[in-house]
């Protein structure tokens, strides 16, 4: 069996499109025949809500079989996997209790590597082609865990002045983490919520081109109300409305990500 590649979606800027991108890239990979495990690393439960009804998400969050309890017990995560209704696509749910994960981690030995260890058996089993992790909008010890458990990082960036603000800090943080997570590679920036009618878009592209060492995916995601309707229906847009503009853009982005991971 082939090697499992773990990719996380991170940016400390809130609302930059991490969860939307993680869910749709994952679902597009699964549609392309890849076996995908999604890990919801955020107390907002948005990744879980992309695949399950609210009631089910809250039930999983309140139960024992979610990421919060797995990390607390330093468990192997195999036992925490749930199937989605989509072929090739499984999920490890989160919990609102993840709000206190930093506190949980504080007393643990080698606390940056608990998620990595929890995923080790799943990776060794080779059951999945990709493990995709949705990170919360922070830069603390938990995001450090997510990065240390990952082989690759995608940074979703909203094409707006405040979306661009702080990006240099984000990349500095990633460079620091690379010192302890030797295998971690930054795949690049995925631009989201692009509105080409806005004149600021041109400046966004110019600013990104100035960041010479950082790859920007050529498939970017434009603003599309189909995304919100899909989320209202607990489905990724690539399944909810495959003919929509954003679905096509996410399918193209997933292809680019897979090509870079080869
Ligand atoms: N292409 C798009 N078109 C329209 N709305 C979008 C698009 N992408 C994301 N959104 C909306 O923007 C909001 C933020 O997106 P999302 O939750 O994916 O960002 P996030 O980075 O995960 O946020 P957080 O930092 O809170 O975890 C959501 O309400 C989502 O529906
Ligand atoms: Mg999110």
Image (cartoon, rainbow, N blue to C red):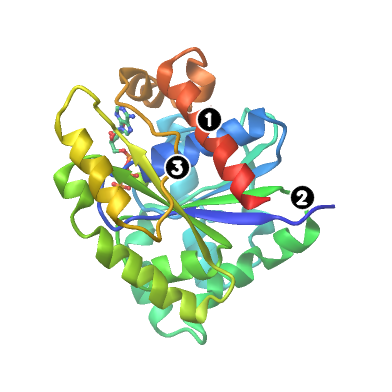
| Residue beneath the point at 62% across and 67% down | 118
Q: Look at mark 1 in the image and give the residue it sits on.
A: 252
Mark 1 burial class by Cα count in 10 Å: few <14, some 14-19, many 20+: some
Identity of the residue drawn at 31% across and 57% down: 211
Q: Residue furthest top?
A: 243
* Foreground disc of the pair 2, 1: 1
The spot of residue 241 in percent (x, y) is 48, 15
Instruction: Say which quarter of the image contains residue 4.
Output: bottom right
Label 2 beta carbon within 8 A of ligand 2: no
Q: Circle 3 — which element? A: loop
Provide residue 204's location: percent of width, then percent of height.
Answer: 23, 42
The CA span between labels 3 and 2 is 28 Å
Ligand 1 within 8 Å, label 3 CB:
no
User: Can the viewer see residue 52 in this picture?
Assistant: no
Q: Which one is closest to the eye, mark 3 or mark 2?
A: 3
Q: Residue at x 50, y 45 (%)?
A: 60
Q: Name the residue: 21% across, 34% down.
A: 201
Q: Tell me the distance, in whole angstroms, between the alpha carbons under discs 3 and 1.
A: 10 Å
Q: Is residue 88 left or right of residue 38?
A: right
Which SS class for mark 1? helix
Query: Circle 2 sits on which residue?
Result: 127
Q: Is residue 166 above or below residue 232?
A: below
- Sequence order check, earlier mark of 3 and 2: 2
Q: Quadrant of residue 101?
A: bottom left
User: In this view of the protein, which residue sits in the foreground, 142 or 206?
Assistant: 206
Counting from the top left corner in percent of width and height, residue 143 is at 40, 65
Q: Residue furthest right?
A: 1
The CA span between labels 2 and 1 is: 24 Å
* Quarter-of-image position of residue 77: bottom right
Find residue 217 and name its label: 3
The number of numbered discs placed on residues in the rendered structure image is: 3
């Amino acid at each position: 069996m082939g090697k499992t590649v773990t990719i996380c979606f991170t940016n400390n800027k809130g609302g930059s499109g991490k969860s939307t991108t993680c869910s749709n890239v994952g679902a597009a990979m699964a549609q392309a025949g890849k076996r995908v495990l999604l890990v919801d690393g955020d107390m907002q439960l948005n990744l879980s809500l992309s695949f399950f009804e609210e009631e089910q998400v809250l039930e999983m969050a309140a139960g024992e079989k979610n990421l919060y309890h797995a990390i607390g017990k330093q468990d192997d995560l195999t036992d925490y996997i749930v199937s989605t209704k989509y072929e090739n696509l499984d999920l490890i749910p989160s919990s609102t209790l993840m709000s206190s994960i930093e506190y949980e981690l504080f007393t643990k030995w080698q606390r940056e590597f608990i998620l990595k260890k929890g995923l080790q058996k799943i990776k060794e089993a080779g059951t999945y082609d990709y493990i995709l992790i949705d990170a919360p909008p922070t830069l603390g010890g938990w995001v450090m865990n997510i990065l240390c458990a990952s082989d690759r990082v995608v940074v979703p960036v909203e094409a707006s002045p405040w979306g661009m603000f702080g990006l240099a800090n984000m990349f500095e943080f990633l460079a620091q983490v690379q010192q302890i997570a030797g295998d971690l590679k930054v795949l690049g920036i995925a631009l989201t919520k692009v509105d080409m009618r806005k004149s600021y878009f041109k400046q966004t592209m110019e600013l990104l081109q100035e960041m010479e060492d950082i790859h920007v995916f050529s498939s970017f995601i434009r603003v599309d109300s189909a995304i919100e309707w899909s989320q209202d229906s607990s489905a990724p847009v690539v399944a909810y409305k495959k003919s929509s503009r954003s679905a096509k853009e996410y399918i193209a982005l997933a292809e680019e990500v897979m090509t870079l991971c080869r």
